[in-house]
Image (cartoon, rainbow, N blue to C red):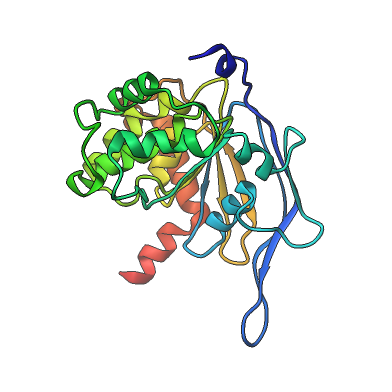
Amino acid sequence: MSSEYAQRTAPEVICTAVGKTFPTANESFVAIEEQDLRLDAGSVTALVGPSGCGKSTLLRIIAGLERPDPGGSVSIDGDAPLQLRQRGELAIAFQDASLLPWRTTAGNVALAQKLARQPVDDERVSELLETVGLAGFEDVRPAALSGGMRQRAAIARCLITVPRLLLLDEPFGAVDELTRRRLNIELPPLWSSATTTTLLVTHSITEAVLLSDRVLVMSPRPGRIVADLPVDLPRPRRVDHLHSDGFGRLVTRIEALLGVDEYLSEGA
């Protein structure tokens, strides 16, 4: 890592009175009630909740891709999200890898540096692709990659700029369960560092507990944060943590908050 990147520090994210109302043909509907939220510098926070509760909308507001309702604001160490994006310090990974089909794997990863106005570092591109298990696929185009490989390339594209804020919106949702579990173990060390603050949106309670320092639970729409749960598990996380008593208790508590047992009993 260059000295420029080494000097970067993870930011604190402060959301103040952030809510979101969408207009419709007949009347407006509230997607997210006004929320105050703080993401500690260097932390990994998971956001879980039922479908349609506003998880992705909240992430997009923090990314600066959606505007909050009037009166709401997002401050990232005093800067607006757009300022971080312009400096290549904010990166987003969505469920769809969205690789450009005409560019090679290495070309897709390097594109992030070009868009961030950083000089392309071919050596770092190669090192990062090796780290995510794509060594030997540098010159391969996305159509020839599996879903899991494309998602690894997308994560590498996010990390190439050494972002201070990393936003992950169901980044493993499009891959099979076996690949997802492997990525859950292999990739977090790349973003769990003192220089990056991470927010992960996921439908998987197990994934949320495995990857994060803290789990935020959202209510059905209009979305609001109803629980803020610390994850007191050692790092690095391993597969055997999935079978620990502490892990199981936390998963069970989140399931209860989300009404999973009630939902299953109604469907029985």
Residue 233 image point, x, y percent: 47, 25
Question: Does residue 263 lie above or below 183 as drawn?
Answer: below
Residue 232 image point, x, y percent: 52, 27
Residue beneath the point at 36% across and 48% down: 97
Question: Does residue 8 lie above or below 226 as drawn?
Answer: above
Quarter of the view holding residue 251: top left
Residue 229 image point, x, y percent: 58, 39
Residue beneath the point at 46% across and 20% down: 234
In what quadrant of the picture does the C terminus appear? bottom left
Residue at the top extreme of this rendering: 3
Viewer-proximal residue among 92 and 230: 92
Question: Does residue 217 lie above or below 28 as drawn?
Answer: above
Quarter of the view holding residue 171: top left
Residue beneath the point at 24% across and 30% down: 134
Residue beneath the point at 73% across and 32% down: 77
Q: In the image, 152: left or right of 201? A: left
Residue at the bottom extreme of this rendering: 26
Residue 250 image point, x, y percent: 47, 39
Q: How many marks?
A: 0
Viewer-proximal residue among 69 and 234: 69
Viewer-proximal residue among 161 and 209: 161
